[in-house]
Image (cartoon, rainbow, N blue to C red):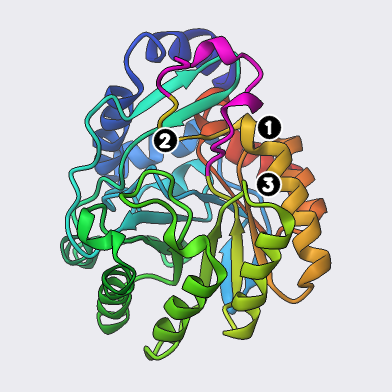
Amino acid sequence: MIRFLYQRALKPILFKFSPDFVHDVFVLIGKKCHLWPMKTLIQLFYGRSKAKYINVDGISYRGPVILAAGFDYNAHLSHSLDAVGFAGEEIGSVTAKPCKGNNPPNLKRLIKSKSIQVYKGLKNDGVDTIIQRLAKQTRPNDFVMGISIAKTNNEDCSVLENAIDDYLYSFKRLNETNTGDYYTLNISCPNAFGGETFTRADYLEKLLEKVKSVDCSKPIYIKMPINLDWNEFTGLLDIIVKYKIHGVIIGNLNKKYDEIDYPNEVDQNNYRGGLSGKPCQKRSTDLIRRTRQYCPDLTIIGCGGVITKEDALEKLDAGADLIQLISGMIFNGPHLINDINNQLR
């Protein structure tokens, strides 16, 4: 019933409004969902997750599905997302300084292509404000909270040394305040000033050398690009293994606009940002499979193109330990999370 209502009633209404507006409305609602009556009502609609607990890098997850970074970038929802079956979420990406992001619209639905064109520009309130916000929230004990870290989206951070210092400030502050359960270094955001600096192996090595000098007892992951050729990709993996990083998230948005199913959904004079959802599906799954063979001991979190429960199973079969998603929840509804959980059960 809830699936039918979302597809036939709620989704057609939501899709009449801009995705930026709908996102802000759902965050506003989610901020109130920690209140007992509303959270209980949501759990009645979606049902309690039947997924088994799994352990990854010493962290216990109540199921394999995590909300990917990019939705709750200002850390308002960690107390409420478990109601629809998420085992955790990744907040951010957060940056050392506040970022107002790119001029709107930041999101565009490509409905037939099952994709979102994302052009946020790392909009967030900055790491210090987010640390303070999270300190005031009470989340369920078994809800995992990761935090994605990126470089501040400004001209200063197009200089290598400044970009490294920017990452380090956020990383140190999160560790000093014991905020979050794991950390992700987002090196592959397509919306940052100066581009993807640390998708070069020699630059990534300089960053990780500094990161590993910080006392950190929590897992560290790298958010990987999916548009590099395999030799460049393995060059990054070699550095990641060298510095004993726990794992990788495969992967980030697709920047190849010729890979969407319906090119006419995008203004061909306005290829800005990156594509989420189905255009990421094959690339990310292939990279998961090849990475599992190349680095059998790395933790792999599969992200990109999880639109159905079958897509999630495909990524797990390819070698992923956990799954992250956003677009599937938008196109198919929040019931997708427990569909995956229950299928795995």
Tell me how far mark 1 sits from mark 3, CA to CA: 15 Å
Q: Which mark is residue 308?
A: 1
Residue sitting at 65 percent across and 27 percent down? 259
Question: Which amino acid is tagged 3?
Answer: Ser
Q: Could you say whether the residue bearing mark 2 is in a helix, strand or loop?
A: loop
The N terminus: image quadrant: top right
From the image, tell me which residue sits under label 3: 284
Question: Which amino acid is tagged 1?
Answer: Thr
The percent coordinates of residue 91 (x first, y second) are 37, 55
The percent coordinates of residue 173 (x first, y second) are 25, 77
From the image, tell me which residue sits under label 2: 273
First of labels 1, 3 by sequence position: 3
132 is within the stretch colored magenta: no
Q: Quadrant of residue 7?
A: top right
254 is within the stretch colored magenta: yes
On screen, residue 48 versus residue 89, left or right, reads: right
Q: Which residues are magenta?
A: 253-270
Residues at marks 2 and 3 touching, judged by CB atoms closer than 8 Å: no
Image: 23 above or below 250: above
The percent coordinates of residue 267 (x first, y second) are 44, 14
Tell me how far mark 1 sits from mark 2, CA to CA: 24 Å
Residue sitting at 65 percent across and 80 percent down? 241
Q: Could you say whether the residue bearing mark 1 is in a helix, strand or loop?
A: loop
On screen, residue 344 versus residue 238, left or right, reads: right
Q: Is residue 152 visible?
A: yes
